[in-house]
Amino acid sequence: MAHTMNTGTIVAIVGDQSEEALATLDGIRGVEVLALRDTEPALATRRIAASGTPWVVHDADPLEHVAAAWVELFEERSTLGALEIEVDTALASFTAGSALMPDYYIVLEPEAAPDTWRHWWCGALGHRAPQRILASPAPTNARDAALRRLLGNLPSSRAWPDPASWLPHLPFEIPDRIGLRD
């Protein structure tokens, strides 16, 4: 789903060290860095949309609860109903404009993530727009330039499909099998 409130490129950085990663991007001309993790989603969306910069980089994932429910379903720690509720909630937020799908996700160290989480990032989500999910090492210090380089070389690709066209089908996106039948 394309965002309509902001004309800049929106990048979400996700992973355990997202706060440190954001710090490495602070001070880049034309980039607004927003620490929004744990911010109420509608407020995070308003802050992202209010930016007038060409780039907005933040750590608020609008699919965070959907991802957790998907992982828990396939780890047999939750039910299909929980995932369906999270999908419906996310879709309602996108429709109401209280959530924005980022143009890109930068996933910090997905190879170190537990298997099902890796399948979420690189499979269930990444399958929808593969060039829009980018792996990056976590920063080693405040001067780490890996993320700066990645941000400066984002690949162009097709936009995300409308979340309403694929989020409801997540229960059928089985880890290790995503994309094999498409």
Image (cartoon, grey):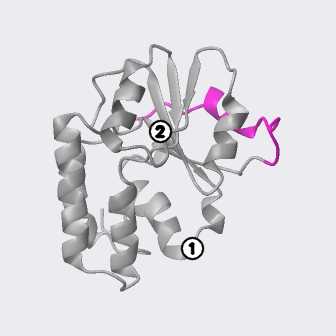
Residue 114 appears at what percent x and percent y?
57, 73
Q: Nearer the viewer, residue 113 or 20?
A: 20
The answer to whether one can see residue 64 in this image is yes
Dot 1 alpha-carbon crowd within 10 angstroms: few under 14, some 14 to 19, many 20 or more? few
Q: How many marks?
A: 2
Q: Is residue 68 above or below residue 105?
A: below
Instruction: Tell me which numbered mark, 2 or 1, is placed earlier along the sequence.
Output: 2
Residue at the spot of label 1: 114
Q: Amino acid at mark 1?
A: Pro
Q: Which residue is located at x 49 percent, y 40 percent?
A: 36
The stretch of residues the image draws in magenta is 140-157
Q: Amino acid at mark 2?
A: Tyr
Residue 145 on the magenta segment = yes
Residue at the spot of label 2: 104
Discs 2, 1 touching: Cβ within 8 Å = no
Q: Which mark is residue 174?
A: none
Residue 82 appears at what percent x and percent y?
24, 72
Dot 2 alpha-carbon crowd within 10 angstroms: few under 14, some 14 to 19, many 20 or more? many
* In the image: residue 156, left or right of residue 107: left
Residue 50 on the magenta segment = no
Q: Is residue 7 above or below residue 123?
A: above
Q: Is residue 63 above or below residue 131?
A: below
* In the image: residue 89, left or right of residue 72: left
Taken as a whole, is the magenta stretch helix, strand or loop? loop
Question: What is the secondary structure assignment of the residue under circle 1?
Answer: loop
In the rendered image, the quadrant that contains the C terminus is bottom left
Q: Which residue is located at x 43 percent, y 47 percent?
A: 61
Residue 6 appears at what percent x and percent y?
36, 21
In the rendered image, the quadrant that contains the N terminus is top left
The answer to whether one can see residue 180 in this image is no
* In the image: residue 47, left or right of residue 142: left
